[in-house]
Amino acid sequence: EKLGYPERMNCAVELIDKNVAEGRGDKLALVSPTERWTYGELAEKVSRIANVLVADFGLQPGNRVLLRFPNTPMMTAVYFAILKAGGIVVATMPLLRAKELAVIVDKAELSLAVCDHRLAEEMELTRDRTDRLTTILYAGSGDEGSLERRMEAASPDFAACDTASDDVCLLGFTSGTTGVPKATMHFHRDMLAICDCYSREVLRPQESDVFIGSPPLAFTFGLGGLVLFPFRVGATAILLERAGPDDLLKAIPEMRPTVMFTAPTAYRAILAKKGDADLSSLRKCVSAGEALPKATWDDWQAATGIRILDGIGATEMLHIFIAAREDEVRPGATGKPVPGYEAKVIGADGKEVSDGMPGRLAVRGPTGCRYLADDRQTAYVIDGWNVTGDTYIRDADGYFWYQARSDDMIVSAGYNIAGPEVEGTMLAHPAVAECGVVGAPDPDRGRIVKAYVVLKPGVTGDAALVKTLQDYIKAELAPYKYPRAIEFVTALPRTETGKLQRFALRELAAGEGEPAAARSAA
Ligand code: 3UK
């Protein structure tokens, strides 16, 4: 391995115990609205929990454990306890329902879950649906058998399992919208590799930094940005259970974080609600999950002086592999490959296309490309390259420009149109707060471009505004890209990770879905 990790290595030792060994035992590791844990306290809790899992629940190296928590210090402690004991974490998005959880339980063959007591209801429904899941350990319930009670009785010392650096430590489920989600496998060394490639080379955090952000820790964007990156440099992380725009706007002036991780839609929402909130503590902001439109980048820089670092990551690659650097930003472009990774744009024949031509993005590097028992492996991984579902263009200067998810390209009267390009342009119009663009069925053109638009407060959506927006797009982009249909809605359907649910908009456009506002409010 070029990164030079030893053959045997446990990432919990590198990310937790090492901070104590290097004299940061009294430094704050985790802060939440209700808790403040130093690295010393965190290390002790991790060891106590590892003892509980091994002694009380028989956890063996290689066993998989389901983890269900909102973003809390305790979730982080349980996470590293599983890793320290040589187990494999299967963290899941807090909002998943029993039906979705049961699929994961069966696919990952899980028998043990550790769960925040506030998520008990859906956890019990999951147990009812599958025979596999036999044991649930609750945290925070205060009961006799609760995690905290067991921790009190456990020893504060635990010798880390002597794992190989390429032992699996994390199964990350993709948020697939159809079929069984893919389970991606990551090694102990991968947890360090994303810190030593993306974080060290692009983000460049310091020990004095304080991290904050919205993604759930069950989403690897959040895991890296809110836990692994700060711990690798002995910095501090703020964990918020609720981290919507209002929560961040309250927390930032109070807790004064310096580095923020969130999605493009959250940057827009924070700007819309900012008022005179003091965001001056921030020095670096990272955006991922979906494309960051130039308009959002420009508005954030104008309001805060900060140049957002866009980056594309994926669950299969663990974290960000193409990114903007502070000194190398082309607003609207994702950026250049992260040191340690290679990226190329390929055509249907698998060969690289010329610069300026669209094609499928393929990437390879120290992390990624390993799926648990999945026939689709061979379609996604070719010669070690992970072939993503994204259409990209590389320009002559080596910058990568996102076009669309390959399945999301709109074909209208023979033209290929990328919804995100129209969305990004719409967002630069002063009347527009949010925009989602999909293809709607049309007898003559096959599909027409349809825009769902959320207006800024005080703007009235009428026929005159439809015409204004259409003329505006025709003037800014090739006229065939203009939305022939525009519908004003109060909200767009989004995933827990901030991604626009294009399939929901497509169903709506085809007359099969619920109204967007009703769906996203549900
Ligand atoms: C899309 C982007 C344009 C793209 C993720 C950072 O999003 C993450 O992982 P997922 O598995 O989704 C992957 C897909 O999301 N995407 C993500 N970032 C961008 N598209 N510009 C971007 N900056 O379609 C990609 O294939 O949920 C992001 C770190 C870890 C992650 N898991």
Image (spheres, rainbow, N blue to C red):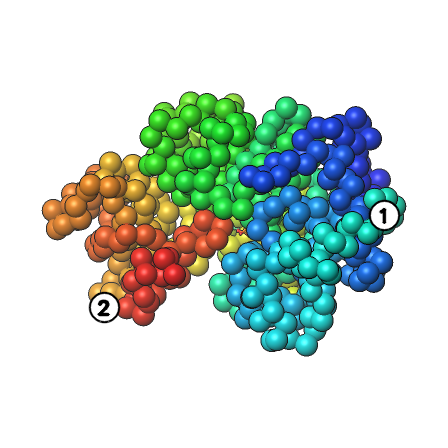
User: Do callouts 2 and 1 mark residues in contact (Cβ within 8 Å)?
Assistant: no
In what element is the residue under mark 2? loop
- The structure residue drawn at horizontal position 26% and vertical position 54%, both measured from the top left corner, is 489
Furthest residue in direction left, as rendered: 464
Q: Which amino acid does label 2 sit on?
A: Pro
Q: Residues within 10 Å of mark 2 (few under 14, many from 20)?
A: few
Q: Read off the residue under disc 1.
A: 155
- The structure residue drawn at horizontal position 74% and vertical position 28%, both measured from the top left corner, is 26
- The structure residue drawn at horizontal position 72% and vertical position 67%, both measured from the top left corner, is 135
Is ligand 1 within 8 Å of the beta carbon of the residue shown at mark 2?
no
Query: Where does residue 308 sit, x and y in percent of width and height?
Result: 47, 31
The reply, left or right, for residue 437 in relation to residue 117 is left
Q: Read off the residue under disc 2.
A: 443
Quarter of the image with the N terminus in it: top right
Q: What residue type is labelled 1?
A: Ser
Q: Can residue 489 be seen in the rendering of this structure?
A: yes
- The structure residue drawn at horizontal position 22% and vertical position 65%, both measured from the top left corner, is 444
The reply, left or right, for residue 48 in relation to residue 494 is right
Query: Where does residue 301 sit, x and y in percent of width and height?
Result: 40, 26
* Position above or below: 299 against 506: above
Query: Where does residue 121 sit, x and y in percent of width and height?
Result: 56, 66
Query: Where does residue 502 sit, x and y in percent of width and height?
Result: 39, 57
* Quarter-of-image position of residue 6: top right
